[in-house]
Image (spheres, rainbow, N blue to C red):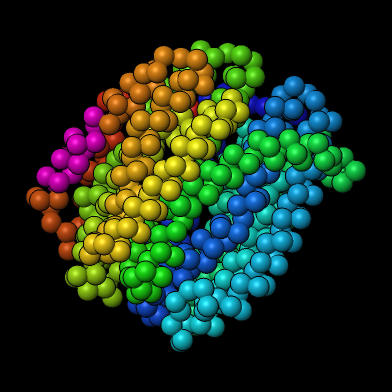
Amino acid sequence: MTVDMGKKQNYKNLIMNVIAFVVQFVISFYISPIIVSNVGASAYGFIGVANDFVSYAAIVATVFNSVASRFIANAFYKKDYDRANNYFNSLIIANIIIASVLGLAGVILVPNLNKVLTIPVNLLFDVKLTFALVFVAYIVSLVTLVFTTSTFVTNRTDIQGIRNIIQYIIRFALVIIFLNFVSIRIYWVAAASTIATIIVAIMNIRLTKRLTPELKIDIKLAKKEHAFELASAGCWMALTSISTILLRGLDLTVANLMIGDYEMGLLSIARTMPNNVTGIINTIAPIFTPVFIAFYVKENILGLVDNLKKSINTMALILFVPISGFIVFSYDFYSLWQKSLTEAELSIVTALSIFTVVQAYFDATTATMAQISVVTNKLKLPVFISFACGIVSIVTEVQLLIFTNMGLYAIVLSTTIVMIIRYIVFNSIYAARCLKQPKGTFFRASIKTWISIPILIGFMVVVRIFLPIDTWIDLIVDAVICGVIGYAFMIAFCGRGELNVLLHKFKN
């Protein structure tokens, strides 16, 4: 096995995973207005709740899977293939056991779902079937998750990006067929996802055999001590997952139980775009991790620090322009996208989206820093900080819902404020601490990119004033103008060197 750690491979990884994200975005862009206009906002909200519930049930899986790739990669880079196979097969057995428990939980939960959530009678069957299909899709994904490790180990996450693109295209094609030629029901969205997951899972098994032939499926190689080693490191990441649920995953459930299913639906629409932004951040940030690990294993800390600083500029260069564009043009976008919503509903959805997406600026520039705790296996403090943030956020939003009339705004504002503080104060300082660098090493690199935010937004507001939007064509024209000038500004501001390398690789 050979591992390509060059810049060319890193950019290939980045590009393919961004394309995968774009395809996924197109799917949600297509599905949402159809469901909302034909079945209602409440029905659309239950798709998100179903995925949230599976994430609650799957916390135990995080214990093993969150750090397994790093353990296997470390063994590979040291050419200790026996140990890599011990981790690999131990993870297979652990995932099968967890999937069985998760399946049992689904069997108990789905028939009694109306006792847990507020579900309109006319949607009861649709929601239960949707939940059942989402559970099936996750179980298949969990059992075969170990077979995505090979792309991480060999720094070929571009191939995994291609697999994701294939999965999304299959899902999109099935959604079009089901919703246009069968019936408009939310469970068809879940059914399409389940079928696509099964197909790509089979492809990932074959991919592992090709990329990492050193990895063999042999349950005799599964060892308790290696499973416990994964669990002892991964338990901290499991606590991080709980923290994430407290910060983001409970919003729809809290809205359903404390406000209503209609309001939950509006919140689900509002968080679609911010979730896509978070999704692309979570897609791009780990792409740098294999390189970080390689530098760390070789004890080349200066090289790691230099690459981490470049990743901060790269994240800002890619994401600040679209985030700013969404903030400025969000009302126009929603009015064209969700035509069945009233002006009052559009205003609520727009405000909720803007309040939520603002934190993405700070998430983007500190997301690669957060990977350093995994690289150095110094996970305890970030976990406790995340858990504390989650507790503060959920307590604050519940109290605001009880004692004020803020409604949905209480849910999004409490999370946004807590997360921005965490990103700014903690992530950069802790990454520097893990690498034994001065506290301000990465903060200075981040703050330079944040200075560009008001400049970008101010320019785009001027464009919006002078070029009003009434149609999709108007929105596209404004977006192109803002995109071209915005990226030109960002390249000059913080990323000219990175762009030259990227263009050179494209040319090659």
Report whether 457 appears left or right of 137: left
Q: Name the residue at 84% across, 31% down.
A: 82
Q: Is residue 160 magenta?
A: no
Report whether 79 appears left or right of 169: right
**Is any atom of residue 463 visible in this view?**
yes
Residue 215 image point, x, y percent: 80, 38
Give the extent of the magenta segment: 451-463
- Majority secondary structure in the magenta region: helix
Between 507 and 373, the residue placed more toward the observer is: 373
Q: Name the residue at 17% across, 59% down.
A: 469
Q: Name the residue at 62% across, 66% down.
A: 135
Residue 365 image point, x, y percent: 38, 33
The quadrant in which residue 333 appears is bottom left
Q: Name the residue at 81% across, 36% down.
A: 225
Q: Is residue 460 magenta?
A: yes
Q: Residue furthest left?
A: 466
